[in-house]
Image (tube, rainbow, N blue to C red):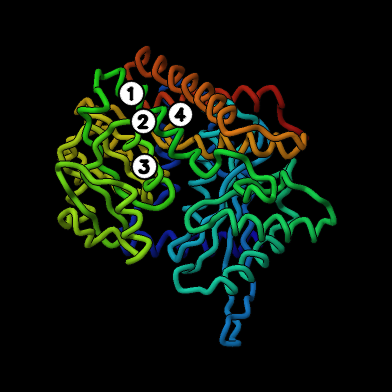
Amino acid sequence: MTNQINTLESLQRELEKDSNKINAFEIAQTQLEKAAYKMNLDPNILAQLKEPERVLMVSFPVKMDDGTVKVFTGFRSQYNTARGPAKGGVRYHPGVTLDEVKALSAWMTWKCAVAGIPYGGAKGGVICNPKEMSEGELERLSRRYIYEIASFIGPEKDIPAPDVYTTPKVMGWYVDTYNKITGKASYSSITGKPLELWGSEGRGEATARGLSYMVEESAQLLNIHPSKAKVVIQGYGNAGSISAKILHEQGYKIIALSDSKGGVYHPQGLEPSSVSNYKAKTGSVRGFPQGEFISNEDLLELECDILVPAALEGVITEENAPNIKAKIIAEAANGPTTPEADEILFKKGILVIPDILANAGGVVVSYFEWVQGLYGYFWDEEKVNRRLKKLLIKAFNEVLKIAQQGKTDNRTAAYIYAISQVAKAMKARGIWP
C-alpha cells in the first residue's frame, strides 16, 4: 500500500507540474515553514509536522444505473492527532488528488488548533463527478467509501463531515453505513448530519455565520460600516451563497457573485435570494437578468471593500494579487491564496482573514454536534451561535495580537498560534516507543 501511495503521489505531482497547476500540499508546506521560521520552531517538531501521520488510499467498485461497474479512487488523510481525534470533511470532485487531500488535512489541523477545539486534522476525497451521477449512484458510492475506510474512522479516532459536493443527506448515508458495520448506534461518528439523525442546529449555516463574525470584527477594525460596504463573493456553493445571504441581512451591499460558469455584477447591489432562486432553476448564477456578466478573473479584481473567495484553492496568485482592490479578504474557501500572493497583499495593506480562521465556523459547530451526540443532549440554535461567536472572536483576537506584535501578516500569525498549540501537545505527549 505504501508503494502504491508513493507511486500515485509522484504521478499526480508530475501531472500537476506538467499542466502548470498549483500544488496545494506544496503551498501548505510553504505556509508551515514560513511560520516555523518566524516562531523559531523546534526542528524536530517541524520535521514531524511536514507530513501527515497516516494516509489511506482505497479503490472500490460501484454498480452504475446502466448495469456497468465503475472503479473509484478515494483517500483519507489524518495529518496530526496530538490534540485529539482527527476531524475533517470529505469532498467529491473530479479534480481530487492525494496532495490536495493531504494539504486540506494539514489546514484542518491548524484550523482546529486556532479555534481551540480538541481535534487534530483530517480530510477525505473521492475522485468522481457528482454532477453526472444519479442519487442512487451517489448513495452506492458513499456507502462503499465509508465501508472501505470504516476501520480508519470513529468518534474517538476520526470524524468525517461534509465538504465540496457532499451534503447532510450524504452524511446520513455515512452514519447509517458506519453504524450497520460496527453494530453500534453511534451518532458522533459523523457530523454535518440531518437534524433527524441528531445533527446540530446551526450547522448548515455555521461556516458562513462564522465568516460573518470575522468580517464584522475586521470591518470594525478598519472603521468600515456595513451600510457603506461593497462585497464580492467568488463561488456560490454552500459557503458562498449563505455568506451572501447573511452579509446582505447585516446591511452589506453584494455587488458581484459567481460560480464555476461565470458571474453576475451589479454596482447597485444584488439580492442573494433572487440569485439563489435563479441558480436553482438554471444551474448557474450566470445570466441572472438583474445584472451583467463578469468572469471569475475580473470579479476578483473589482473595486470593493470585502472580497470573499469561496470556491477552490489557488485563485489569488502573484499574477492577479497586484490588481486586487479589496480592503478585506475573507477566505471562505480553503487555500484560495498562494504564498506569493500573500506577500503582495500584505505589502498592499489588505487585511486577509485566513481560511483557517475565516471558515472555521463549520468545524466548530461540528465539534458542538459531536459533543451533543456523545451526551445525547442537544442545544437550540441561539446557544450554538452564541458559543460559536465566543470561540471565534477569541481566536481572532489571539491571531491579531500575534500579527501586531510580530509585524507579520494574519495568515502567518494564525499559523504561529495554531502550530504552537499543536507543538505544545506533541511535547507533552513525547515520542513512544
Q: Which mark is residue 245?
A: 3
| Amino acid at pointer 4 | Tyr
Residue annotated with mark 2: 353
Mark 1 → mark 2, Cα distance in angstroms: 8 Å
Under circle 2, the secondary element is strand
Q: Which is more foreground, mark 4 or mark 1?
A: 1
Residue for point 44% across, 69% down: 131
Question: x, y (%) of residue 114?
Answer: 51, 27
How many C-alpha atoms fall within 10 Å of the one at disc 4: few (<14), some, or many (≥20)? many
CA distance separating discs 3 and 2: 19 Å
In 3D space, how far apart are the residues under numbered discs 2 and 4 (Cα atoms)? 12 Å
Looking at the rendering, which quadrant does residue 12 occupy? bottom left
Q: Is residue 368 above or below residue 77?
A: above
- Give residue 272's position: percent from left, percent from top: 31, 47
Would residue 309 appear left or right of 188 to someone viewing this image? left
x and y percentages locating residue 237 in the rendered image: 40, 53
User: Which label belongs to residue 415?
Assistant: 4
Image quarter where the C terminus lies is top right
Instruction: Describe residue 11's horizontal placement relative to residue 310 as left or right.
Output: right
| Contact check, label 1 and label 2, Cβ < 8 Å | yes
